Image (cartoon, rainbow, N blue to C red):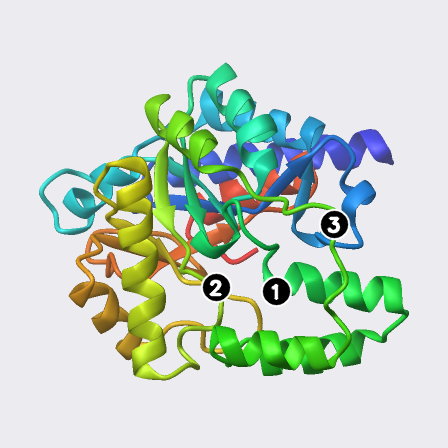
Amino acid sequence: MLKQAAKSAIRKLKLLQVVQSVARPRILILRYHSVRKDPALLDDCISVGITHSLAVFRSQMEYVAKRCNPISLERLPDVTNGRIEVPRRGVIVTFDDGYIDNYAIAAPVLEEYGLRGVFYIPTSSVEGRSLWFIRLRHWQIRGGKSRQEFLDVSSRCAVLSDSDREEFMARLGNDSAVPDTFSMTWAQARELQSRGHIIGSHSVNHPNIAKVSSNEMKTEMECSKRTIEERLDCQVEHFSYPNPILEPHWDRSTIQACRCAHYRTAVTSTEGHVVQGTNTLALPRHSVPNSFDEFVWNLEMAFNGSKR
């Protein structure tokens, strides 16, 4: 039965690839967060749900390098506006949250296969305090809080200004130290850039910017951009909308704010693929499963334009 199922899957995969040869070309922007040798070790701070094991990530990147057409985010505006053709099986690899394992583990794997990534960093956590949702997860797990309690508190924190959020979290008794900041340093971000990777902004404090005030939205987009530019001596043109909790996490107002801040691209956590005409300030991405087989199947289905 197992052999028959495997053969059936292979036949289906080959059929999908035949369909792709005549289907409309699409680009998939892959969305990762954390890559660790043992995801379970830090589950009390960074959920295994947004973490890929090193072994699985390596196998996924090998597939991308050998079977797909990796492209740079810098080329994407020219693709969407029709100046250059949409490449078949195009893939862009992105990471949110700026975790140190992006630098220490993920980037070397990318480079092993000749790939480069886009790393979106929330500037307040670089050589600063851990992001608020990491501290809240620590509060939940170590304090024995329920999942619902965590969601309720996260929903409140996601829409507050930074000062109001810190005050609220202090009242929770969440001022105990988290064992690590988890974020890469400015020197590491600078090194990634020198090795050909792209550093983009993921806001300052990682709120749901579609739910905060217009002034807070402006601050989150513009201050993070300015900080990265000053620290890395570069021009920052790419943004990733934080999606901590609640929907929508982007809308017309966030698109306009991105435009005013002079970002060329902005990625979302909304599922989908990129084709000619896609709004570069509301780019869909493809969430990545934590297994190789499911990754391959979902990728091939997406290239075919089919739902998973």
Please state if 238 lies on the left or on the right of 165 as rendered.
left
Mark 2 burial class by Cα count in 10 Å: few <14, some 14-19, many 20+: many
Q: In which quarter of the image is residue 199?
A: top left
Instruction: Verify CB contact (< 8 Å) between mark 2 and mark 1.
Output: yes
Q: How many marks?
A: 3
According to the picture, the residue beneath numbered tag 1 turns out to be 132
Figure quadrant of the C terminus: bottom right
> Residue 275 in the image: x percent, y percent?
27, 51
Mark 3 burial class by Cα count in 10 Å: few <14, some 14-19, many 20+: some
Q: Which one is nearer the viewer's eye here, 107 or 304?
A: 107
According to the picture, the residue beneath numbered tag 2 turns out to be 205
Tag 2's secondary structure?
Answer: loop
Q: Which of marks 3 and 2 is in front?
A: 2
Q: Can you say whether 166 is above or below 87 in the image? A: below
According to the picture, the residue beneath numbered tag 3 turns out to be 48
- Give the Cα separation between the discs numbered 3 and 2: 22 Å
Q: Which one is nearer the viewer's eye here, 175 or 304?
A: 175
Q: Earlier in the sequence, mark 3 or mark 2?
A: 3
Q: Residue drawn 25% across and 36% down?
A: 233
Q: Earlier in the sequence, mark 3 or mark 1?
A: 3
Tag 3's secondary structure?
Answer: helix
Report the amino acid beneath label 1.
Trp
Tag 1's secondary structure?
Answer: helix
Q: Can you say whether 288 is above or below 161 in the image? A: above
